[in-house]
Amino acid sequence: MDEAQLEMVLSRAMNDDAEAFGELYRLFRPRVFGLCRHLLGRHEDAEDATSEVFARLPKSIKRYEKSLPFPRWLLSVTSHYCVDRLRRRQLEQRLFEAEPAEALQLPVHQASPLQQVISDEGRDRVRQAIEALPEQYRIPLTLRYYSDLSYDEIAEQLSLSRPNVATLIFRAKQQLRRALAGAAAGAG
Amino acid sequence: MDHFSELTYSMYADGELPEPERLRVQQHLAQCPACGAQVAALEVENRVLAEVFRLTEEADSAKSRVGIGRSLLITVGSALVVALGLDRLFVAIERFVPDLGSWMSGFSFAWLQSLVFNNAFDLIREGPVMLNALVTVLGLLVLGAVLFSVLRHFISRHPMSMALVATVLFALVIPRPASAIERREATKLRVPSDETVQGSLIAQGDVVEIDGTVDGSVAVTGRIAVIRGDIKGDLFAFAQETEIVGTVEGSVYAWTNALTVSGHVGQDVVVGTNNLRLEGTVGRDVASLSETLDDTGTVGRNLQAYVGSLTVSRSARIGGNLEAHVKNTQDVNVESGATISGKTEILIGKKKSNRYATTHFYYWQAIWFAGALIIGFLLYWVAPALFGSRLDTGGALLISAGVGFLALVAAPIAAVVCFITLVGIPLGVLLLGLWLAGLWVAKVFVGAALGRGLMRQRPGEPPHFAVPFIVGLLMIFVAINIPYVGGWLSFLTILVGFGLAVLGVRNGMRKTVATT
C-alpha cells in the first residue's frame, strides 16, 4: 500500500468508517503486536494490549496529526499505552530509577560481540538476550530500535531526562554484550 | 590523545550527540583509528539490533502459523504412534482374554455402526423425526465449529498442551485396523456363491448381491441389496430395498424402504422401514419402526413394533412377547393360529400427560434448586477462585463451551486409560467421580457467571455473590425446563459449566502460584 492509499484509509477511518479500521488492523497489527511483545514481555499481555490499542483507535485517531507519519504515531500511541500498563502492573514500584549519567565515563575497550552475530542462530540469541533484559533497559532499547524514536521522544514518553535515556540505552547494550559474550563463552 | 567515553561514542553512533560535541568527536575520530573502529563497531551493532527487532516482528506474526503447523505435525505423528501402540496392546490382550479384547476394541467399525444405528433408531422413534435429525446435525456442526475454533485458539497459545489432548482424541477416532475391512464399489456388485470374503466388507453399488460367504460383517449401501449367501457377522444396510434370503448369523440393522427377511437371522433385527416382511426366522428380538409389518415367520424372542399396521398371520411364531405401538386397536391383526408364547400388548399411542401440570414436578424442581444453591454457596465458600471466569462476551461463551466439551470427552477417556493401567485405578475413580459431579454442578457455575454478567455491579461496590447467583441459577432452571429447547440448553449448560470449572481451576492455580 502506498502513501496515497494509506491516506485514503486514514481519512475514511477518521470519518468513522468501520472497514477502514479493519484495514488498519490488518496492516499494522504485526508491528503493534511486535512492539507490545517487546515492551510487555509476555505473549498474552502483548495480545491483550494490541487489541486494546486497536479498540481505542476509533477514539484516539481523532488526535492524530498529519505532520507525523501514521506508523510512527501509532507506535508512539502503542508505547504510551504499554508503558502505562507497565506502571500499573508495578503499582508503586518505580519503573525507572534515575541513573547518575556521569558515573559512566568508561574507558574505551574492545569491539562488541553484538556485531559478530550475523547468522540467524545468532540473531535468535540476541532476541532472547533482549527478552531477558530487565524492563528498565528493555523498554528504552525497544523504543529506540524498534519504534525508531529519538532520545528526546523516549525521554518524554518515559518521563525521564535525556541523559538518563542515553545512559539506559548504553547500559542496555552493555548488558546485552555481556549476556552474549557469556553465552558464547558458555557455548564454546 | 584525548579519547571520549564509550557512552559518548554510543550517543554519537545513535546520532544523538548535540552539535558542538558531535563535531569534536568527529574531529577526534578522523585522527584516532582505534576510536574510529570502535564507533564503526557500534554502528554495526545498531544495525544488528534494528534488524533483530524487525525480524522478531515478522517472526511473531508468522509464529502462529508455524506453531499450528508444527503442533499439527506433532499431533498427527503422536496420534499414529498412540493408535499403533493401542492396537498392539489390544492384540496382546485379545490373545490372553479373547472376549475382553473384542469388548475393549470398542471403537471398531461394527461397534460404531451399531451405536449409530441404535441411537438413530431411538432418536427417530422418540420424537418428531425430521426436526430431531436436523437439530442433531446442526448441533454437531456447531460443536465441530466451536471445537475447531477453540483448538485453533489454544494451539496458537499452548501448542504442546493441546497437542496432547488432540492426540488422545485423535487416537480414539482412528478406527482399529484389527480385522481387515474390504471395500468394494460397483454399479452391479456381486459376491459370487463360490467366494468367501475374509473379514468384513463394505459394499456400495446400485444393486448389491451377496451370494457367497462373508466371514465378518457387511455394511451395504445401495438401491437394492439381496443377501442369498451367508454373513457370519452383522449386516448394516442403508438401501431402498433389502432382502435377506440367505443367512445373517449376527444381527441386522437396517434403514431401508422395504425389508424382507425370508432367510435366517441369528440374532436381532433392528429396522426403520416402510414395509417389513418377516417370512423366515429371527433368532432373537425384532424391533421395528415401520408403516406395515407382516409376520408370517418365526421370531425367537420378543417382537416390538412401532407400526402403522401389524399383521401376525397364523403361521407366525413369536417366542416372547408381542408389543405393538399403534394408533388404534384395529391396526393390529393377529390371526387365530398364530403362536405367541409371551403376552400380547397393544399400546395405543396417547399423549403424554403434561408434566408441567403436576405438583410433583415443581416439588422436585424446588428440591433440585435448593440443592444447587447449597452446593453453589459451599463451593464459593471453599474455593471462590472457581467462580473467577466470566461469560460477558460471545467469545468467552464459545471458549468455555469448547473447553467444556473437551473436558467432557477427555475426562472419561482419561479415566478409562487410568483403569487400563491398573495402578491408576484410584485416580480413574476420582476422575470419574469428579466428572459425574461436574455434570451436575455445571449449572451452578453457569448460574453464577450468568447472574454476574446480568447484574453488573458498579465500581466501588463490594463484590457480592449471593443475589446474582440466585438470579442466574433461577434462570438456568427455567431455561432447561423449556419444552423441546430445554434439552439442548441443558446440554449447553453442561458444556459451558464444565468449561467454566476447568478455567476456574486453572485461574485458581495460577493465582496460588503467583502468591506463593
Image: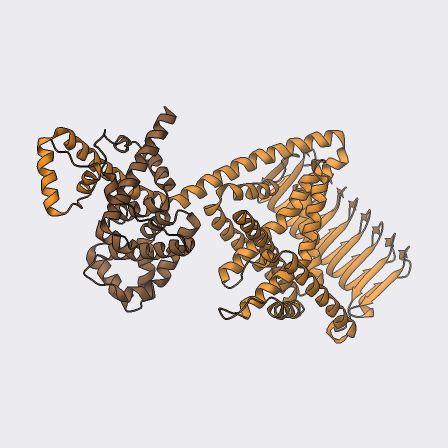
Chain colours: A brown, B orange
Query: What percent of the width, then of the height, locates residue B76?
Result: 52, 38
Is B440 in front, or is B275? B440
Query: What percent of the width, then of the height, locates residue B170?
Result: 57, 42
| Residue B356 image-quadrant placement | bottom right
Q: Quadrant of the C terminus of chain A?
A: top left
Q: Please determine whether, in this image, residue A176 is positioned above or below residue B137.
A: above
Can residue A51 be seen here? The reply is yes
Is B503 in front, or is B360? B503
Q: Please determine whether, in this image, residue B314 is positioned above or below residue B475.
A: above
Horizontal side, residue B96 vs residue B10: left or right: right
Can residue B211 be seen here? The reply is no
| Residue B427 image-quadrant placement | top right
Is B395 in front, or is A125? A125
- Residue that sits furthest to the bottom in the current view: B357
Q: Quadrant of the N terminus of chain A?
A: bottom left
Horizontal side, residue B137 vs residue A155: left or right: right
| Residue B106 image-quadrant placement | top right
Horizontal side, residue B279 vs residue B185: left or right: right
Query: What percent of the width, then of the height, locates residue A152?
Result: 22, 52
